[in-house]
Amino acid sequence: MPLAEAAHELRTPLATLRLAVENGSTSPTRAPAAVDEAVRLVDRLGRPVTGLLARARVEAATQAIELTPLRLD
C-alpha cells in the first residue's frame, strides 16, 4: 500500500471518530451512541494499521511472507 493511500485510509476514520466524540461530548443523550461509533471506528482504524505493520515487518525481513495456495476454479 503506497504511503499516500495509507494516510488516506487512516485520515477518513480519524475525522469521523473526531466528529463522533465531539457529538457525544456536547449532549449526554448522544454519548452512548457516540461511544459505540467511536469503538466501531477504532476497530476500522486497526485494520489498515495491522496491514501496515505486517508490511513493515516483511520489508524489514523480521517476518517471512506466508504464501497460501489459491484455487481459481
Image (cartoon, grey):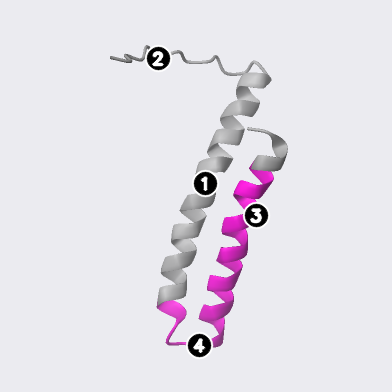
- Residue at mark 4: 27
Q: Quadrant of the N terminus?
A: top right
Label 3 element class = helix
Q: Main secondary structure of the magenta part?
A: helix
Three-letter code, disc 1 = Gly
Which numbered disc, 1 or 4, marks the residue that appears first in the sequence?
4
User: Between marks 2 and 3, how big is the CA–CA gap?
Assistant: 31 Å
Three-letter code, disc 3 = Arg
- Tell me: residue 52, above or below residue 44: above
Badge nearest the viewer, 1 or 2 = 2
Which numbered disc, 1 or 3, marks the residue that appears first in the sequence?
3
Q: Residues within 10 Å of mark 1 (few under 14, many from 20)?
A: few
- Residue at mark 3: 11
Q: Is residue 71 left or right of residue 52?
A: left
Three-letter code, disc 2 = Thr
Magenta region, residue range:
6-32
Three-letter code, disc 4 = Ser
Q: Quadrant of residue 13?
A: bottom right
- Residue at mark 2: 68
User: Between marks 1 and 4, how big is the CA–CA gap?
Assistant: 27 Å
Q: Quadrant of the C terminus?
A: top left
Instruction: Where is residue 52? Give x, y as percent.
Output: 61, 35
Q: Residue furthest right?
A: 4
Q: Is residue 55 left or right of residue 69?
A: right
Instruction: Where is residue 32? Give x, y as percent.
Output: 41, 77
- Residue at mark 1: 46
